[in-house]
Image (cartoon, grey):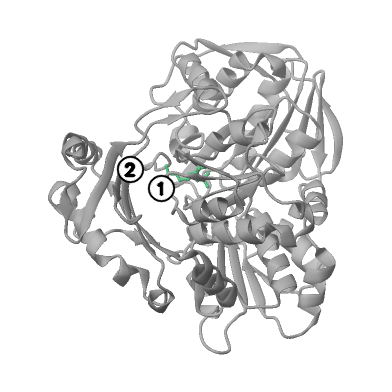
Amino acid sequence: MEPKTIKTTPFAGQRPGTSGLRKKVRVFAQPHYLENFVQSIFDTQDALAGGSLVVGGDGRYYNREAIQTILRMAAANGVARVLVGQGGILSTPAVSCLIRKYKTQGGIVLSASHNPGGPEEDFGIKFNVASGGPAPESVTEAMFARTQTIDTYRSLDCPDTDLDQLGTVQIGTMQVEVIDPVADYAALMESLFDFGAIEALFNSGLFKLRFDAMHAVTGPYAIEILENRLGASPGTVMNGVPLPDFGGHHPDPNLAHAQELVHLCHGTDGLDFGAASDGDGDRNMILGKEFFVTPSDSLAVLAANAHLTPGYKHGIRGIARSMPTSQAADRVAEAMGIESFETPTGWKFFGNLLDAGRITLCGEESFGTGSDHVREKDGLWAVLFWLNLLAVRKQSVAEIVTEHWRHFGRNFYTRHDYEAVNAEAAAGLVNHLNVLLPALPGKRLGAYTVAYADDFAYTDPIDGSVSKHQGIRIGFEGGARIVLRLSGTGTEGATLRVYVESYEPDPTKHHQDPQDALAPLIRIARDLAQIEERTGRAEPTVIT
Ligand code: G16
């Protein structure tokens, strides 16, 4: 089996976004499209030749085909060993766990995360570096540059590898190990959380829970951990079989897309705990009985209670949140006397802080929470963290969060998304805001006075790299904020995200609905950005 060199020409638009390259399946399925991107990984990551690589995906449509292509190309590019999840399945946090545990030179994740799957839907590919984290911008930019000049790629003529059979096979000189996708990850979870306490909670017969795997990758992980190891009753995991089209749904764990679960948490007879994870298993949503925990609050609560779990009992070093995430975690960090950081959107920006030991926990408003145990956000980890807290504190989800607010004050928070808007109109809206920014500080908008207004730029405290144009921040006196930015993960037109936050120290006002509490700020954001005028949209597509 001799490697073949195949002629190709560059494709436009292969620059990775917030989290890898995401496009429609039909774009990826064009001859040479995936191959060009994969060869650009091998051409820029020298350590892969003679090294090892983890490969797996969320099981969406085109997952298996892409893995076969990657295996042939890895063999032709001199990779010595590939670990691939059985059935082509590996969650994003499991890939990170495997890269770190087996000290591979990197990993390739096939996923478009929470975006729908199927022949007409989305696919994605992402490279993770040897630390286990998403490739930093310097690496993704080098790959992108390579995609623009590429003229050949290498592959091997060989039959498909059987991805369903555990064990080791050889492709040319490369070893392919088809591994259990769950075992190493489950062992890591067991080392961090008090499985005995969680099991006792489940056995009490007084605790009703469901986990919605949304027919995505976390099904096998949740069944093994929650049902097999922790003894939750069979059926606790709903939608537990990964399907190529996620059963026709958006595998996006939020109030809009996990409605069945939300419904199960309603009423006095509702679940005590409901949780969901996304396509590739890195996001999480936490619900209590009639109670939704915002991801921003979740980060703050986990940080304030981390000492109650075995994995974090010696305390946490620092906390980081992405810029649009509410400032609730900053208050916890301040009270604990530890550092807090505000990074741009994108998990990759936490990597240096985690590697340098400056932070232990980090999180994002986009339903992502994680820690230094891997270098990705981790959906099931967050669920187990919450279960550990519930088992130890012997309180409900609502009691834990409202008590947190009483102590730290409440950061009311909402995100309004305007999806698939005209890209030029969205760019025009951002330009318009950029022109307004310098004149805003000191100005009164409704009942609020602008304290600062800027186009967020981040200087990485570890390597000094600068990332500009990361979203527009308008901060008001008293801690309220409006943030506007364009999503880096959409595949259709542009998605405008409007994040609105206010701070309320008075516990007698904490019961309000966030949409009501934030209504004046939402109005200010719409008017200032001329959203309806510029996008033609009177209302957002999704509110979370
Ligand atoms: C990705 C990134 C996250 C980011 C999210 C939303 O998550 O890993 O860091 O917060 O996208 O990004 P945007 O607002 O640009 O759409 P995932 O779960 O999609 O990989």
User: Which residue appears at 55% of the width and 11% of the height?
Assistant: 152
Query: Which percent across, then down, holds residue 513?
Result: 36, 74
Label 1 SS = loop
Q: Residue furthest right?
A: 167
Q: Is residue 389 above or below residue 511?
A: above
User: Which residue appears at 61% of the width and 44% of the height?
Assistant: 318
**Quadrant location, the C terminus:** bottom left
Q: Which residue is mark 1?
A: 324
Q: Mark 1 Cα within 10 Å, few/some/many (few <14, many 20+)?
A: many
Query: Is residue 264 shown to the viewer in this render?
Result: yes
Q: Which residue is mark 2?
A: 485
Quarter occupied by residue 348: top right
Horizontal side of 69 relative to 510 (left or right) equals right
User: Decide: marks 2, 1 in contact (CB < 8 A)?
Assistant: yes
Amino acid type, callout 2: Arg
Nearest to viewer (mark 2 / mark 1): 1
* 45 or 374, nearer to the observer: 374
Label 2 SS = strand
Amino acid type, callout 1: Pro
Q: Which mark is residue 225?
A: none
Q: Earlier in the sequence, mark 2 or mark 1?
A: 1
Ligand 1 within 8 Å, label 2 CB: yes
